[in-house]
Amino acid sequence: MTNLNYFLIRRVHSLTGVIPLGVFLIGHLTTNSMAAFGQEAFSHKVELIHSLGPLLPFVEAAMIFIPLAIHILLGIFIAFTGKSNATDLGYGRNWAYTLQRWTGWAALAFIVYHTMELRFLDEPGARALTGSVLNGKVLTAGDVFFMHLAEEFQSVLYVLVYLLGGFAVIYHFANGLCTFCMTWGITVGARSQKTMSWIALATGLLLFGMLVAAIVGFRSAYDSAEYEAMRALLGGLPH
Amino acid sequence: MSGRVIIVGGGLAGLAATIKVAEAGVPVDLFSVVPVKRSHSVCAQGGINAAKNMKGEGDHPDIHVTDTLFGGEYLADQPLVRRMCDEAPNIIDLLDRMGVTFNRTPEGFLDFRRFGGTLHNRTAFAGATTGQQLMYALDEQVRRYEAASLVEKYEYWEFLSAVKDGEGRCRGIAAMNIWDREVKVFRANAVCICTGGPGMVFGKSTNSVINTGAAASRVWQQGVWYANGEFIQVHPTSIPGADKLRLISESVRGEGGRVWVPRNPADKRDPVEIPDSDRDYFLETKYPKYGNLVPRDVATREIFSVCVDENRGINGENMVYLDITPARSGKDGEVLERKLGGVFEIYRKFAGDDPIQRPMRIFPGMHYSMGGLWVSPVDGGGQVRQKTNVPGLFSAGEVEFQYLGANRLGANSLLSCIFGGFTAGPRMVEWIASHPEEADESVYSDELKRQNAENDKVLGMNSGGENAFALHRELGQAMTAQCTVVRRNEGLRQLMDKLGELEERWSDIDVNDASTPVNQSFAFTRALFDMIQLAKAMAKGALLRDECRGAHYKPDFDLEKPEKEQLGDHRMTDAYKGFVRELEAKHGVEYDAKFKEAPAGTAPAAPEFQEYMRNWVEQQKRWSKTTLATWKPNAEPDIEFRDVVMTCEPPKPRIYK
Amino acid sequence: MADKKVHLIVKRQEGPDSAPYWEEFEVPHTPGMNVISALMETRLNPVTRDGKRVRPVTWDSGCLEEVCGACSMLINGRPRQSCSALVDNLEQPIRLEPFSKFPVLRDLMVDRSPMFEALKRIKAWVPVDGTYAMGPAEKIDPAQQQEMYKYSECMTCGCCLEACPQYNDSSAFVGASAIGQAYLFNMNPTGKTLKDDRLDEMMGPGGVVDCGNAQNCVRVCPKGIPLTDAIAAIGGQVTLHAVKRLLRQ
């Protein structure tokens, strides 16, 4: 491999983490945090995404799945070149480095679970239900997901999985923003790097706030009678 | 071009020589006992002299020559000093081109500062680590030649001996790989010894622990003369550590630092609790006018004599207090911090104490050897040769003797090392062009056998009761006590006996390690023998030289000076005039008028001063000579004295009116 | 004071291929002593704490003033120079180990030659035409000189590499010291004629791109060199260099 190719590969890893994956993460959490404002607001956002129609799978592939696969594969390779020593040298950035690797693995596991469950297992059911009429209202995919998630988040374990998985993804992104700026030579001095870490911390907290808002939104909007009615409609969602 | 060059030592001189040889297209094998980048030259702090006259002071290489000769009390061969000072500005430019991070003026020119022994801003500097910066610049150039396969480095290889053929010519070296103790012989048409100073002979000094002087001693034992060994520069203020002595700048005294010892040497109190009434500010008492600001050599001698002769050091150890605390110096702590912060940092880092809170503990420290391997001054064409008396063997840097005379001017050492190396390189290239023959294989195999036998002997030393490191401590203590600041013949005589005793006890060392990898105990034991030998050259030279000159101070032979009012201009005395005429006739030169004639209207010399100058001239005639030591097995070295070449200017007495 | 002791635990190893083991020593305490002088004391009478006579400890040292870079070791787990490690500032017993990222030669001494090889790789030199008198060099702005000076104090001691999680057997990373030198020589008016060569190296495997931004290097550097500034700056230079290379292909 030429030096230039090696460089490009490393930079692709760095870049994909921010664009498009970071951008997607922000959009995704924004959408889901709408759950805090109730089913209407959430469904409206989901409709917007679904309005892409047949283009959606291509957009998903280009914006999410392909960059994600690249980021994961290169990330695994990078993770194996490092040997963490934060327990011996417990400096802040050394812990940040170590956590970046740990959260990488955790995020990978979470994302696989999260995608498999909601995108590939639940999605067909949701599509099947779309257009049905419940309590005099025509269901959209967003409505189906909302009610489904409202039910799922009743489980404390489920909440915990999302809090931890969400934390891993958000930490990985926020700290990644800092290292992105170092790697690309944007923040060169120690002070600018410090400033950037505050910005990243704020970003991370904001995103985590959105996650919590979404979970709270889903949990509090749960209406067991309505959910049972929806299940009854088509024999229920898978699982 | 056929032929190879071996350079031993990778400090400034060795690297400078390597660059010049490689530049001429001749392959170099560079040997060093440590990775060259860790050589002792990195320790030089102050700077490097060159009369570039960048401050509009009318500085000139001629004045640099005069300052250097005067500072060295006219013991340096003058044409060499002339060459060095003339070349200095070019060397600075070259170092600058090589990327040395010299300090700059606001406009971006090289900055120069003042140093001891001159009135001119002549010293280029790079922060407080000039030696390190120069070293790295040369190291980088050598690495460039290494990458181009012109230089091969043998790092962690210890020089054992020169390989000499039947005619006494040097044909290569024997060296030992420190990692696995393997001895090998290497062919070369010319060899250059650039192995630095012998600080370890004094036990603790400001030198690196690698500066054993063993390499110099080994070639001395093979017939190279050792010259001016008795001239050892001692720095007045250093931090006496358990492991070494670290320099503390003299600027502390300049800012109001006061030197004292407790009146009662057994006083165990914390120094801050000792009131003034229980303190002896001995410099202030003895020199009411100058107080703590007496010249560096006087301060050195007084501190030394209080501790060594009077045994009044702190806790009976060789230490005195240097007090810069605001309460005693009368200076504000913040002001001190601003002016001396760098010095305080060194003290805090290595002594672990704060000079603003508590007085520093200091003692004079052996710092630099003006003497070293003898190299012949100039050839017929006036070229500097860097050549020892063994054909094919060259030398440059602190390990040779020739540029500094009886004392070294600050910031001249870096210059002499680089100039020596830059000179030795081309001289070796010339030499190998006229001496391309290969030596017989048996010359090498014989030397290999000899060195392996020597190693086996030392490795087998395991039945005696002596410890090499403890014996080294004794050597250092004896040398420091008798052969540094103040010298007396009685003490030096005892020292010679002591060295003989140490040599005998050396055979009783238990090496306590017969293993192969990095056997430091064994290597040190071998080197210790050579240190003891070299110590003899220094002590014997000091014993025989009955005068005071430069760093060599023998109070029993100090010329008695007339009262201050009776001092005059030396050029007005008949003795001096006659002396100069004699020198002119002897060297076939005519000195510049300014050295001979006092300005019109100068008062005639008083009779007492005439008398003093007569004695001074007698002393010059007797002792303006290079000491040459020849090694003798199991005996004291032979010493002879040789005239110094004085073709630039006549000696001038040290008179401060 | 008189009977105060210093307790050392030293990781020892006979040679490059042998297994390490530990030995404990106790030496008299003297005021202001550093780790080196404690080790020197053990040589005078190499007997362990439990009375066993052993061979003297081997370690690397030179100037003892923290400018030569020789005496690096792990002291209570931290990579540093043993000359500037004062016993009174350390927790006892003092644990001494050789650097773990370099091959051990014996006891506390390791082979750091890869560091010098790295300097060759990045062409850490100014390509002067020759050593003859060719007149003065270019003027340099004092602010730039000050910036360069910081990096020219690097003594190749290896602390930054020992501390770096990315510098290990499974990575070709050159580490912070070499990147700092690349940055230094790219700043020099003549040195920068080799800038493209250096950045080519910095782009490839083991170059600046392999840095994981743990920033331990800057924390352990005994000379306080702002290594992470250099890493980020070289990261930026490499980015521009790559764009240039791509556009000119």
Image: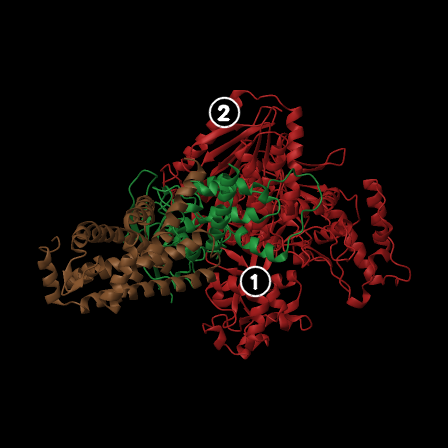
Chain colours: A brown, B red, C green
| Residue at x-position 56% and y-position 37% | B144
Q: Depth check: give the residue in front, C165 or B569.
A: C165
Is label 2 in a helix, a strand or a loop?
A: helix
Q: Is residue C128 above or below residue A174?
A: above
Q: Chain of mark 1?
A: B
Q: Depth check: give the residue in front, C249 or B570.
A: C249
Q: Is residue A149 visible?
A: yes
Residue at the limit of the structure toward the front, as seen here: A136
Q: Is residue A151 above or below residue B30?
A: below
Looking at the rendered structure, the kind of residue marked 2 is Asp
Of circles 1 and 2, the one toward us is: 2
Q: Is residue B465 left or right of residue B170?
A: left
Residue C19: give x, y in percent of width and height: 28, 42
Q: Which residue is mark 2?
A: B446
Question: Would you identify the image quadrant in which residue B224 lies?
Answer: top right
Residue B309: assigned label: 1
Q: Is residue B325 above or below residue C28?
A: below
Residue B399: give x, y in percent of width and height: 60, 43
Which quadrant holds the N terminus of chain A?
A: top left
Looking at the rendered structure, the kind of residue marked 1 is Asp
Residue C90: give x, y in percent of width and height: 37, 61
| Residue at x-position 33% and y-position 58% | A27
Q: Are marks 1 and 2 in contact (CB under 8 Å)?
A: no
